Image (tube, rainbow, N blue to C red):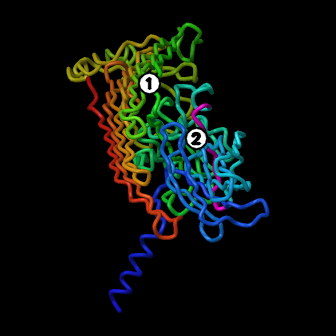
């Protein structure tokens, strides 16, 4: 009795459908004859145009079929049945996390005859409750993007808005990796994935890796009513699908240049801030073995030299010698009396100290009071060049990074696929004007940052239980990010 129960449990598990964070698509539908009756035992095959991958199924007693775990891309659907003409449907484009329904109507006739539908298939998703939009490869490559940041295309979707300037300024560097806010939630409430693997930065609540747009096949932002597999966040889930190779070799080379030739002067600077920025790289993909093994690899470099202007309060020339007489501001009605004391109108309002310290005549320190330590410390500060004690300068901020990645897809059989993908980003930032501390030259901050992401997955589709079920093995992934801040350099 116990053994039969265990067999039943094993059979139930074998015929279940578990997808984790799904990065593929599905096709389902009903096959009918001209009278509207369902057609049983019809053979349904989907062929991916780019790689030649074939996935097949048979219709059940109700004429239903389902093809599971199909990589995103373009497909042709073929349906054959005894006593009916072969049915071919072209123009099927599957997106990530999509379950498309395609009705099939067979025509009575010889199986050697073909009914071919060349118009693009109108796909409907009656079983999907999540709300969100897919940004396709053509949009990613054709639309202008500042800095080639793909997430800017997400701002075109309903409910998705960029960070406000005030929020960015208040957060500073802690919001550099954040992309957008969704449906009124905080920017930290979003989740990010690459090929189903975690890409969420717990430090700033943004992305860890930002792959170049030439490596992205498409991405979807789920903004509402996501399935249970997409948990973790209250805001949105952004699922990025990277490009894979195909049976044809394809690649790209690029370089984008920005400079200060057409820039305007920014306050408080008096000249145009220098700017030299280069983004360059290349990608290539193709077959290792036709219809079997494919690769795609990319590299992108980023070099930025940008001026930043800042004004800071520094000791005046007189204060360096112990003369603080300038603190008695005549513009506010303050003057020195005959005894060398600065009379402040505030004293007349009863705001004087109860036990004031003994003042120094004319706010000047005698030479014995000036220590050599203070003199050495003052040598690190520049002389004022704007007003009495303000120093304004334009320094060059440096930001360099390199990122690369490779993806391998291998089809063991029509029901077994292997996928490996590795990404790395490594860079260095040098800020001559510390964002926290002494904002004068000579106290720079340097940061090294590195992030890596690896995904390995094997997908097997079962067809022996009810001809429509599948089991997706959990993808194994490892994501690591490191962010190191160097000590200030004096």
- In percent of the image, x 45 and y 67: which residue is there? 464
Q: Examine the rendered structure and indicate whether residue 257 appears above or below residue 105.
A: above
- Residue 302 picture location, percent across and down: 41, 22
The one nearer the camera, 401 or 198, is 198
Decide: few, some or many residues near mark 1? Use Cα within 10 Å; few <14, some 14-19, many ≥20.
Answer: some
The one nearer the camera, 313 or 163, is 163
Q: Which mark is residue 74?
A: 2
Q: What is the residue that sits farthest to the bottom in this orientation?
A: 1
Is 131 in the magenta?
Answer: yes
Secondary structure type for disc 1: loop
The image quadrant that residue 61 belongs to is bottom right
416 with respect to 365 (left or right):
right
The image quadrant that residue 482 belongs to is top left
Q: Earlier in the sequence, mark 1 or mark 2?
A: 2
Q: CA distance from mark 1 to mark 2?
A: 86 Å
Q: What is the residue that sits farthest to the right in this orientation?
A: 35
Quarter of the image with the C terminus is: top left
Decide: few, some or many residues near mark 2? Use Cα within 10 Å; few <14, some 14-19, many ≥20.
Answer: some
The one nearer the camera, 363 or 410, is 410
- In percent of the image, x 33 and y 27: which residue is there? 428
Q: Which residues are magenta?
A: 127-138
* Residue tagged 1: 341
Is 386 in the magenta?
Answer: no
34 with respect to 380 (left or right):
right
Q: Examine the rendered structure and indicate whether residue 134 appears above or below residue 35.
A: above
């Amino acid at each position: 009795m116990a053994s039969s129960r265990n067999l039943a449990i094993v059979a139930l598990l074998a015929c279940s459908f578990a997808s984790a964070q799904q990065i593929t698509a599905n096709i389902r539908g009903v096959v009918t004859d001209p009278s509207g009756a369902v057609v049983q035992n019809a053979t349904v095959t989907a062929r991916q145009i780019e790689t030649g991958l074939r996935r097949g199924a048979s219709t059940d007693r109700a004429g239903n079929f389902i093809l599971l775990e199909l990589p995103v891309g373009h497909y042709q659907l073929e349906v054959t049945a005894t006593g009916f003409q072969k049915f071919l449907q072209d123009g099927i484009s599957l997106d990530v996390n999509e379950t498309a329904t395609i009705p099939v109507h067979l025509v009575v006739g010889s199986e050697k005859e073909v009914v071919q539908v060349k118009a693009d298939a109108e796909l409907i998703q009656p079983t999907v409750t999540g709300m969100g939009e897919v940004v396709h490869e053509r949009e990613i490559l054709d639309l202008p993007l500042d800095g080639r940041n793909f997430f800017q295309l997400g701002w075109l979707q309903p409910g998705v808005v960029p960070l406000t300037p005030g929020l960015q300024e208040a957060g500073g560097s802690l919001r550099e990796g954040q992309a957008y806010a969704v449906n009124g939630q905080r920017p930290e409430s979003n989740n990010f994935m690459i090929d189903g693997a975690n890409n969420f930065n717990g430090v700033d609540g943004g992305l860890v890796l930002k792959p170049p747009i030439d490596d992205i096949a498409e991405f979807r932002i789920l903004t509402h009513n996501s399935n249970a597999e997409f948990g973790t966040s209250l805001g949105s889930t952004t699922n990025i699908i990277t490009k894979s190779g195909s049976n044809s070799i394809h690649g790209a080379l690029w370089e984008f240049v920005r400079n200060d030739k057409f820039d305007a002067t920014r306050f408080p600077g008096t000249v145009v801030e220098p700017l030299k920025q280069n983004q360059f790289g290349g990608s290539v993909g193709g077959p290792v073995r036709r219809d079997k093994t494919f690769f795609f690899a990319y590299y992108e470099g980023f070099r930025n030299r940008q001026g930043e202007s800042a004004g800071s309060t520094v000791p005046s020339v007189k204060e360096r010698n112990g003369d603080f007489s300038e603190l008695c501001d005549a513009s506010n009605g303050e003057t020195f009396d005959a005894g060398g004391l600065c009379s402040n109108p505030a004293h007349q309002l009863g705001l004087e100290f109860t036990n004031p310290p003994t003042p120094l005549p004319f706010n000047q320190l005698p030479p014995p009071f000036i220590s050599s330590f203070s003199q050495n410390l003052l040598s690190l500060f520049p002389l004022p060049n704007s007003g009495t004690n303000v120093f304004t300068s334009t320094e060059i901020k440096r930001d360099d990074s390199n990122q690369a990645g490779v993806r391998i897809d291998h089809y063991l059989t029509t029901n077994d696929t292997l996928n490996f993908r590795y990404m790395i980003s490594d860079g260095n930032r040098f800020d001559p004007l510390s964002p926290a501390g002494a904002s004068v030259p000579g106290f720079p901050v340097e940061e090294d940052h590195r992030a890596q992401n690896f995904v390995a997955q094997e997908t097997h589709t079962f067809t022996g239980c009810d001809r429509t079920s599948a089991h997706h093995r959990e993808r194994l992934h490892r994501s690591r990010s490191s962010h190191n801040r160097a000590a200030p350099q004096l």
